[in-house]
Image (spheres, helix red, strand yellow):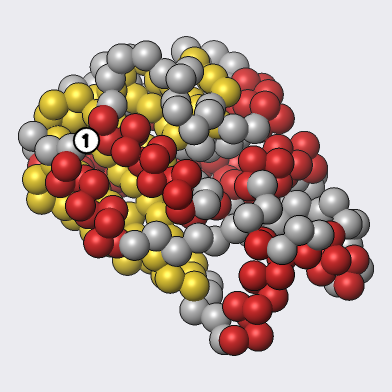
């Protein structure tokens, strides 16, 4: 599998806002209005997500929150408006540098991530991860999810988003396999499409919903609230839960 970490670092260096939210409005040096929409959407998402968690599961403490795969801070900044202490974790140093610039005036602790989550200490009242795990190979992603769920405090909540199915025909699946699983495939297909050989790409990995639900159960989460999402050619799910 082509390194998702190298690709994400390249996205952070070349087109960080589009990488976080793949909308043409956020390509390159987007307008001030587009940038405002980018962050307004993040604030609306966090406000709605926390409201749904507390409506279905009851109130959660507002002390510590974690945004895993924080990117440029789109969701991390609004979390800082709800929680006393917020940590943003990302695998890309370029993304973290941009997040720091966006977070002036907010007490957010941005840290570089790894597969063992060694940058983290303690537990959290709320853990958020949105449009992140889908870009991480499943074997690594399940280990990361295991570590994240273990760090939710008793009576704490989480919002975990992941992809569960690519809706592609045989030709599309073949091209996906060449691009993401064959050494040199990414560079070859980039060149054939008129791009730089080093142009970054995004994986869209298919997580087993059954395996994910089982992991939530192992970590002591009770009922799960799940919301389906249609991301173009990919089926996704947002899981909201509270630990017992």
Residue 2 visible in the picture: yes
- Give the residue at x 38% y 27%: 66
In which quarter of the view is residue 82 placed?
Answer: top left
For mark 1, give the secondary structure.
Answer: strand
Furthest residue to the front? 183
Q: Quadrant of the C terminus?
A: top left
Q: Is residue 124 left or right of residue 191?
A: left
- Give the residue at x 57% y 23%: 112
Q: Is residue 231 left or right of residue 156?
A: right
Residue 60 visible in the picture: no
Q: Quadrant of the N terminus?
A: bottom right
In which quarter of the view is residue 116 placed?
Answer: top left
Q: Is residue 151 left or right of residue 19?
A: left
Could you say where residue 61 lies in the image, as x and y percent from the top left? Answer: 18, 22
121 versus 76 height, above or below:
above
41 versus 124 height, above or below:
below
Query: Mark 1 highlights which residue?
Result: 157
Numbered-mark total: 1
In which quarter of the view is residue 203 placed?
Answer: bottom right
Could you say where residue 170 lies in the image, as x and y percent from the top left? Answer: 59, 86
Could you say where residue 211 lies in the image, as x and y percent from the top left? Answer: 27, 56
């Amino acid at each position: 599998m082509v390194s998702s970490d190298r690709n994400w670092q390249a996205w952070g260096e070349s087109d960080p806002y589009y990488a976080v939210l793949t909308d043409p409005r956020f390509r390159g040096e987007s307008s001030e209005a587009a940038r405002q929409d980018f962050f307004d959407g993040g604030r609306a998402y966090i406000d709605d997500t926390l409201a749904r968690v507390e409506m279905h599961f009851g109130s959660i403490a507002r002390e510590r929150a974690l945004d895993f795969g924080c990117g440029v801070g789109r969701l991390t900044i609004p979390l800082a408006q709800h929680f006393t202490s917020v940590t943003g974790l990302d695998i890309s140093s370029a993304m973290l540098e941009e997040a720091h610039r966006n977070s002036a005036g907010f007490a957010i602790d941005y840290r570089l991530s790894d597969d063992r989550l060694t940058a983290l200490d303690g537990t959290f009242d709320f853990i958020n991860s949105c449009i992140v795990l889908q870009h991480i190979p499943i074997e690594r992603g399940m280990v990361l999810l295991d570590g994240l769920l273990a760090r939710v405090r008793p009576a704490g909540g989480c919002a975990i988003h992941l992809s569960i199915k690519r809706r592609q025909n045989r030709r599309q699946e073949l091209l996906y396999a060449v691009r993401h699983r064959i050494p040199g495939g990414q560079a070859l297909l980039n060149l054939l499409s008129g791009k730089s050989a080093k142009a970054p790409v995004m994986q869209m990995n298919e997580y087993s919903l059954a395996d994910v639900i089982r992991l939530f159960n192992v970590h002591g989460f009770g009922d799960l609230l799940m919301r389906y999402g249609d991301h173009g050619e990919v089926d996704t799910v947002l899981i909201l839960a509270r630990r017992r």
